[in-house]
Amino acid sequence: MAESFPGTIRHYEEAGLIVPSARSEGGFRLYTQPDLDRLAVVKRMKPLSFTLDEMRDLLAVLDALDTATGVDRAALLDRLAMFHTAAARVTALRDQLALAEGFAGTLRATLDHHQGPAA
């Protein structure tokens, strides 16, 4: 069963990935646009099978890039490039999966054609 959106946010908060900027008087979490942007990054990484540590690492890289200079900035960009490479591999796997599904469909159609109607 899929986890509910509030439960997902709570999980990410407990893992230290998303932190609400404030809380209302009633105790509700209040998120700013940058908080929601972080959540969007995490939600896009999850289906790509990135671990919580990898998500944390990428978020740290993205946070630090805005103010980093010199050697630190170059190291952060190298790290970001590694995440890009990992995400691009998923795209290649998706393309391979589409080809395999198409091929399996062709084989199924050929098999169905030659077997004829079921008895």
Image: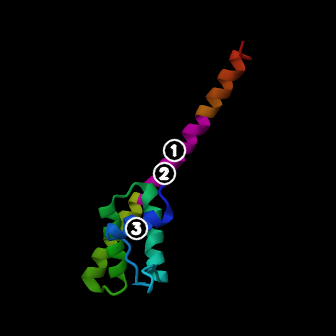
Tell me which colouring the rendered structure shows: rainbow
| Mark 1 / mark 3, whichever is N-terminal | 3
At label 2, which amino acid type do we have? Ala
Which residue is most to the front? 26
Q: Is residue 102 magenta?
A: yes
Graded by Cα atoms within 10 Å as few (under 14), some (14 to 19) or many (20 or more), the crowding at tag 1 reads few
Q: Which contiguous range is marked in magenta?
A: 87-103
State yes or no: discs 2 and 1 in contact (Cβ < 8 Å): yes
Q: Nearer the viewer, residue 83 or 54?
A: 54
User: Relative to residue 61, is residue 102 depicted above or below?
Assistant: above
Q: Taking 42 as reference, is 109 above or below it?
A: above
Q: What's the magenta bit mostly, secondary-structure-wise?
A: helix
State the residue at coordinates (45%, 79%).
28
Q: Is residue 46 magenta?
A: no
Mark carried by residue 92: 2
Question: At which x and y percent is residue 67?
Answer: 33, 87
Residues at marks 2 and 1, CA–CA distance in whole angstroms = 6 Å
As drawn, is 8 to the left or to the right of 15?
A: right
| x, y percent for residue 21 | 40, 83
Instruction: Bin the neighbour count of mark 2 within 10 Å (Cα to Cα): few under 14, some 14-19, many 20 and up.
Output: few
Q: Are marks 3 and 2 in contact (CB under 8 Å)?
A: no
Which residue is at the front of the view, 15 or 105?
A: 15
At numbered mark 2, what does the secondary structure look like: helix, strand or loop?
A: helix
Looking at the picture, which amino acid does disc 1 mark?
A: Gln
N-term-proximal mark, 3 vs 2: 3
- Residue situated in front as seen by the camera: 48 or 5: 5
